[in-house]
Amino acid sequence: MTTALDQKEWQPAADTADSSKNEEGGKKPRGKARFVFELSLYLAVAMVGLEGLLGAIGVGQQEIMMPEAELGCVHIPGKMVTWRLEGYSRGKFSSAGLRDREREIAKPAGVYRIAVMGDSAAEGLQVEQNETYAARLEERLNSKQNQIKQNQSEKFEVINFGCSSYSTGQEYLQYKRQVQAYKPDLILLMMCKGDTLENNLNPQDRNKAEPRPYFYLDQAGQLEQDNSILQMNKAKLSQDGWFNQTVNWLRANSNVYGMVSRTNFNLFLSDKAYFRLTRLLQDISRKASSLGGKEEIAVPLYGAQNNRQVTLALLSRFNQEAKAAGTRFAVTLFPDVTNSDQDWKDTIKALKDRASAEDFDVIDLQPPFRQDKNPQGLFLQYHFSRAGHELTADTIEKFLEQKKIR
C-alpha cells in the first residue's frame, strides 16, 4: 500500500527522470551558452596544445623585433628564438634585448669592456650564440694562454649589441640610448656595404620608406636628423593602446602568431598578387589615417643626398661622442671576397681617409677573408658561417694585440 508520503517522495524522481526528455521523448538540446562555453574551452585547450607543440619543435620563434618610436624597432627582450632562415640557432635574448648572456650595466672593476655593434652580421643569428665573433673574441681574450702571454690579469667583456636591419644612424642612436650606459672602453662597429643606402632617404619617395630615423646634410654641410617617417608611423610604433599592447604580447609570447607572421612575410616576398594586395591595403590604410584632422607632420626640406657623405658624417659624429665619453671607436668592415663592388671599394677608401684624419680605427676583414683557403666556406648565404665568425674574432684579436689594447 502506497502512502501519501511515498507518493510525494516518488513524484520528483519521475519528474527528474523525464526532465532530460522533450515532448517527443528525445533529449532536450543543450543551451547555447553551454555550447559556446564548451567550444571556447575546446579551442583554448587546442590552442595551448598547439603552442606547446610549436614551442617544443621551435616553429614560430623567428619573430625577433618589436616596433619602437625612437629607433623604429628593437629586439624583443627575453624572446626565445629558433632561427632557420639561414643557418640555425636556438637561444634567448637577454632581458635587455641583447643576443648575449645577462650583463650588468655597471662595469666591474678590472674589466676592459668592448661593445660589438652592427646589424645582422654582428647579431649572428645564423650560428649559435657562443659561436658569434663577439662571444669567440671574449673567450679568446680571457683564455689562460693569452693571460700568461700578456702577463696581465685584466678581464675582458665583449657585449653583443648587434641588431638585424639597423642602419648606421640607428646604431648611433642606439649607442646614445643604450650602449653608452655600459661605459665600453672600445666600440667595434660592423659596417656592411648596404649601410650607406639606409642612412638617408629620397625626399620624393617618403611613402615607401621604412619607419626608422634618417639623416641628411643641410646646406651648411651639418648633419641633421629627419624623424618625419617615424612621425608618419607614430600610431603603428606606439607602445600604447590595447591593440598595440596585445600584438606586442603575441610577438613576444605566441608561436602561433610567429608562424602566421612568417607565412605572411613569405607570401609578401614570393607571391606578386599577394604583394600588390598588401601594398594596396597599406596605401588605403595610410590615406585613411591621414584624414580626420591628424596632427601636421613637420617634414624638413632638403634635396637629394650623397649616401656616402651622410654615412661618413654619421661616423664622425659617432667617433666624437664616443671620444667624449672616454671610449675608443673602431669600424669593422664586412668583407667583399669577390672584390667586384667598385662603390664599396670607393666607400672603404673614403672611410679609411676619414679615420686617419679623425683618429679612429678601421679593421679591414677583406685581406684575411680573401687569403683563406676556402673563402666561400666562411659564409652561409649572406652571413658569416661558424668559420667566418671564428676568422673575424681572430682578426680582431690580432688588431687588439697590435694596438696593445690587451
Image: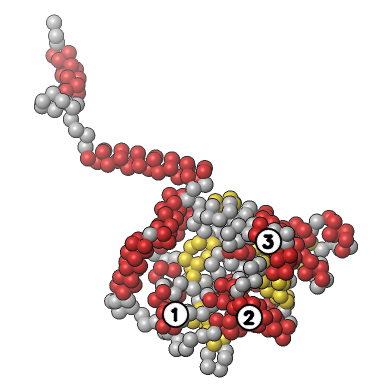
Give residue 187's position: percent from left, percent from top. Answer: 69, 71
Q: Secondary structure at mark 2?
A: helix
Mark 3 = which residue? 375
Q: Amino acid at mark 3?
A: Pro
Q: Are marks 3 and 2 in contact (CB under 8 Å)?
A: no
Q: Residue at x 43, y 40 (%)?
A: 49
Q: Nearer the viewer, mark 3 or mark 1?
A: 3
In the rendering, which numbered label is found on residue 228? 1
Q: Residue at x 69, y 80 (%)?
A: 352
Instruction: Categorize mark 3 by other alpha carbons within 10 Å: few (<14), some (14-19), many (20+).
Output: some
Q: Amino acid at mark 1?
A: Ser
Q: Nearer the viewer, mark 2 or mark 1?
A: 2
Q: Secondary structure at mark 1?
A: helix
Instruction: Categorize mark 1 by other alpha carbons within 10 Å: few (<14), some (14-19), many (20+).
Output: some
Q: Nearer the N terminus, badge 3 or badge 2? A: 2
Give residue 215's position: percent from left, percent from top. Answer: 53, 81
Q: CA distance from mark 2 to mark 1?
A: 30 Å
Mark 2 = which residue? 346
Q: Nearer the N terminus, badge 2 or badge 1? A: 1
The vertical placement of 339 against 63, above or below, is below
Q: Residue at x 13, y 23 (%)?
A: 25
Q: Quadrant of residue 365?
A: bottom right
Give residue 162's position: percent from left, percent from top. Answer: 61, 65
Colouring mode (rainbow / by chain / secondary structure / one colour)? secondary structure
Q: Quadrant of residue 399?
A: bottom right
Instruction: Categorize mark 2 by other alpha carbons within 10 Å: few (<14), some (14-19), many (20+).
Output: few
Q: Nearer the viewer, residue 73 or 377?
A: 377
Left or right of 61 in this view: 247: left
Q: Nearer the viewer, residue 179 or 314?
A: 314
The vertical placement of 59 against 382, above or below, is above
Q: Nearer the N terminus, badge 3 or badge 1? A: 1
